[in-house]
Amino acid sequence: MNRSLFLDAFLKILEIPHKLVLTIHTNPDGDAVGSALALAAFLRVHNQEVTIVSPNKFPEFLSWLKGADHILIFDQQAKEVKARLQTADYVFCLDYNGVSRSGALQEDLLKLNCPLVLIDHHREPETDSFKLMYSNISVSSTAEMIYELIAETDVEQLKNQEIAEALFAGIMTDTGSFSHSINRAETFNAVARLIENGLDAVHVHQQIYDTFSENRLRLLGYSISNRMQVFNEFSTAVITLSKDDLNRFNFQIGDTEGIVNYPLSIHNIMMSVLITEKSDQIRFSFRSKGNFSVHELAKNHFNGGGHNNAAGGNLKLSFKEAIDYLIKVLPFYKNQLNS
Ligand SMILES: [Mn+2]
């Protein structure tokens, strides 16, 4: 569905009050939470009844954002979430490209009678699942897409600081503080306009990046000095964190956020991988520089996907098997990684 068709449909939704549920992906990040909070605040201005649902807990460093305390967490408030889903007129899917990325929510989303509305920037959206779709894989973040929607439908709301802070939080975190996915002028135009309208960008940056616990910073140091392996023959660096490693630093959700980016700062390292042992599966996070597509890698071998330079996946393996598996896969990509 093209953009102008989506805009028409979106404007139609705004015309009369509806019950709307905004959902985000499992293990939500700054873009997922920021997009949902900004869109929710915008929709409420337009007399919509809005509930935000996250499949599981979001990172603590996002909890200061206005409205974050009203987000329903499915794995803690399942009954309430199910009730809201049952009476919804539309359910939005923000910052994820397929129903399976909603984790524990998946089953309930598949049973819905109301239309699903996608707004997302990940590659290869599950087209068939969504009645309304706004997908653009070249945009920095879903928050930037929400910005565009607001700029085109009610530009005055860009002055609303609740909206502006949430949008900026999404754009800033999904670009690694403006270090990747920043080759479109539109991204900076969006931020410039938010600042012209009163946004305190430094305040948002500090609230998100300068609020580490001591344990989180020590976990980062430990990850790099004790748990990073460099495979020069594959231009790849791998950080592996077991449950014991995480427990040692009193792991809180969000504490491993960003760790995967650091190995890319090594000269000639084209791909960075973070392998994290979760309670029931192994989480793989991938980052790359240049043309090497970690989306393809994640899709082909790790039951995942994402973007060309940032992707993730999950496998049900033991921690040891997961590391061995990655090491077996790397040689297939040797030429691409070294080109
Ligand atoms: Mn995103």
Image (cartoon, rainbow, N blue to C red):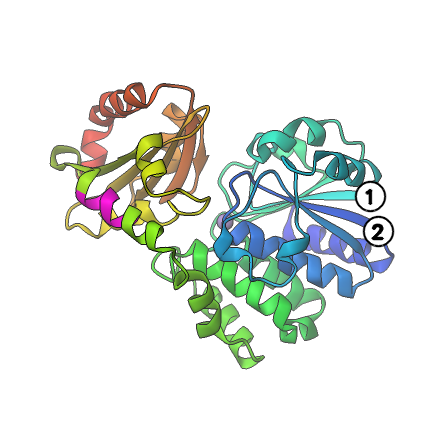
Quadrant of res 269:
top left
Quadrant of res 209:
bottom left
Which segment did they paint magenta? 220-225
On the rendered structure, is 180 left or right of 270? Answer: right
Q: Which amino acid, by three-letter code, is at mark 2?
A: His
Mark 2: few, some, or many residues within 10 Å (few <14, many ≥20)?
Answer: some
Q: Which amino acid, by three-letter code, is at mark 1?
A: Asp
Res 179 visible: yes
Q: Is residue 314 above or below residue 247?
A: above
On the rendered structure, is 95 left or right of 211? Answer: right
The residue wearing badge 2 is 18
Taking depth in this image into account, of 118 and 127 the one nearest to the observer is 118
Taking depth in this image into account, of 290 and 83 the one nearest to the observer is 83
Give percent across and percent down for residue 34: 56, 57
The residue wearing badge 1 is 89
Name the residue: 61% across, 58% down. Answer: 146
Callout 2: SS: loop
Q: Earlier in the sequence, mark 2 or mark 1?
A: 2
Q: Is residue 106 above or below residue 120?
A: above
Give percent across and percent down for residue 32: 55, 49
